[in-house]
Amino acid sequence: MEDYSIKNTTKEQRIELIRSWQPEDETSDENNLDMWEIYRDYIDGKKEIAECNAEFAKKADYMVEE
């Protein structure tokens, strides 16, 4: 398993990692999740992936399906 921690990656590598998680056809993302916004702090070297995931999960608890 690769180490994607901030200390072991460059900003360019972090961008490529997030890009690899994007669906091939971004218009088909039925949840309308903005991966760039979710992982902005990771890309910028401010928070690790796990911290971004935890923050997103916390926000998701407050989302209501229409």
Image (spheres, helix red, strand yellow):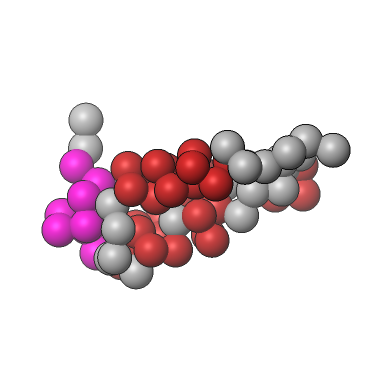
Q: Is residue 34 above or below residue 64?
A: below
For residue 31, which quarter of the picture? top right
Q: Is residue 46 left or right of residue 31?
A: left
Residue 18 percent coordinates (x, y): 45, 51
Residue 37 percent coordinates (x, y): 54, 61
Residue 54 percent coordinates (x, y): 40, 42
Q: Is residue 19 above or below residue 53?
A: below
Task: Specify whether residue 5 is painted magenta.
Answer: yes
Q: Residue furthest top?
A: 1
Residue at coordinates 62% horizontally, 42% vertically from top-left?
62
The residue nearer to you, when weighing 50 against 59, is 59
Q: Which residues are magenta?
A: 3-10
Residue at coordinates 28% horizontally, 65% vertically from top-left?
45
Quadrant of the drawing holding the N terminus: top left
Residue 50 percent coordinates (x, y): 32, 42
Q: Is residue 1 left or right of residue 21?
A: left
The residue nearer to you, when weighing 52 against 30, is 52
